[in-house]
Image: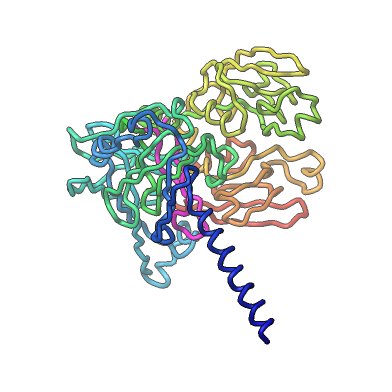
Amino acid sequence: MKEFIKLLSIAVLGGFVVLGGQYFFNNTDSSGSSKVDFQQISTPIPIRRVANFENEEDYKLPDLKSAASKTVHAVVYIQTEFTRKSSVYDEYFSMDDYFGKRSQSVLRASGSGVIISSDGYIVTNNHVVQEADKITVTLNDKRTYKAKVIGTNPATDLALLKIGEIELDFVTFGNSDDIQVGDWVLAVGNPYNLTSTVTAGIISAKARNINILGSNSAIESFLQTDAVVNPGNSGGALVDIKGDLVGINAAIASRTGSYIGYSFAIPVSIVKKVVKDLKEFGSVQRAFLGITIKNVDAKLAKEMDLDEIKGVLVETVMEKGAAANSGIEEDAIIMDVNGIPVNSQSELLEKIGLHRPGDKIKLNILYRKKLREYDVILTNRYGTTKLDEQTDGDAYDRIGAQFQDIPKKLQSKLDINNGQQVINLENGLFKTAGIRNDFIILKIGNYIIQTEEDIKTAFDDKSGGILIEGIYPNGVSAYYGIGL
């Protein structure tokens, strides 16, 4: 027992010696002096900046107060009222004589708008005022006005309004082409009826196509930003740090209906062109190349043995279009427009969309590994350079389909001698009404349809509702009603 106690005592003493030595060495600096601090366990680790700035100005955030105060008085609150109709058939079949006057519910919505001139012109989104029976504009100082629609353009989701007032605060146009990814911007609008709300962020990307306008002819080349935008911000201003307008807020990326990270704005380069056309013509003069296009990716570049993944591929060239008239062929790759590189469908559509029919542009095109410059005179959708007051923004532009002449064999099979066949159906009036691809339009209202121009004339000459008669290739006749 004595031996056991002796050994135990030695072991305990040795353990204390080891612990003491470890504690001493861990709390002594290189000079040998003790640095024991019994409070260091509860002291937080200091956080230091990684960058080595010479002075505070190098990492100071931009002052956004001037841009905010300059913009907030030029952004307006828009309230709309419109009538929900029971059915598209109510537009052309009146049942009131049999069942009496039926009630129609009045719906209300709200959004934002931007004053762009001192005499009361206001830009907003088309979807903010579309089909509105009454539009009320409230200024930041709470003055209220009834607004008149000067024109709308569904292909860019823009609308131009006018109120009867002068000497208004307004936002000046900036340059969306010069703005770069990483630049600071402010979003100003009226989310959730919270008027005059300002949020800040940066440009996250440019030339985004998010496929929300539902048309192959739509121009989607959005500025993407992380400035907070919510329902009600639509039609509001996106401005740079100088307070100049660089975009009109239009959409958010969200699974919930509320902001979760990204928002999208229509570049001011497009806004300026649309506003100018709506003021001068009441509609947008849209120019076309007369081609279908496709993005160049790694797979396509390998198939075509391209040295670089750049440009936009010409898939098909339409007869009598601007491209065909200039000698451009299928499988050509458009590298730039007027010296500005284009590397996506959205970039190309944006650059062409800034022009009118009859405008001359220069295209650098790569074809069979040879680069060549083409002078191209742009046309309208019908292949002419004529300016048409109804080329865009009307019911025809919202059809969401293309047309072709009926093949001779099909004409003989169905025993018909007129009509236009629906192809390339997309989101729009036709798809909403239930029309399917390959449907043959024989008659619209009182118009017998022979050419695509007849379809346009029938829609331009009709308001309220329209009845379409036709037949499918299997011989089944069909009738569709469309509310306009």
Q: Which quarter shows the N terminus?
A: bottom right
**Which residue is depicted at the point 22% across and 32% down?**
119
Q: Is residue 254 left or right of residue 134?
A: right
User: Can residue 394 be seen in the rendering of this structure?
Assistant: no
**What is the quadrant of residue 423 in the picture?**
top right
Bounds of the magenta segment: 244-268
Q: Is residue 437 above or below residue 96?
A: above
User: Can residue 363 be seen in the rendering of this structure?
Assistant: yes
Which of these two is toward me, 42 or 360? 42
Which of these two is toward me, 462 or 391? 391
Q: Is residue 333 above or below residue 245?
A: above
Q: Is residue 246 magenta?
A: yes
x%, y% of residue 389?
44, 30
x%, y% of residue 458?
53, 42
Which of these two is toward me, 469 or 210? 210
Q: Is residue 38 left or right of residue 196?
A: right
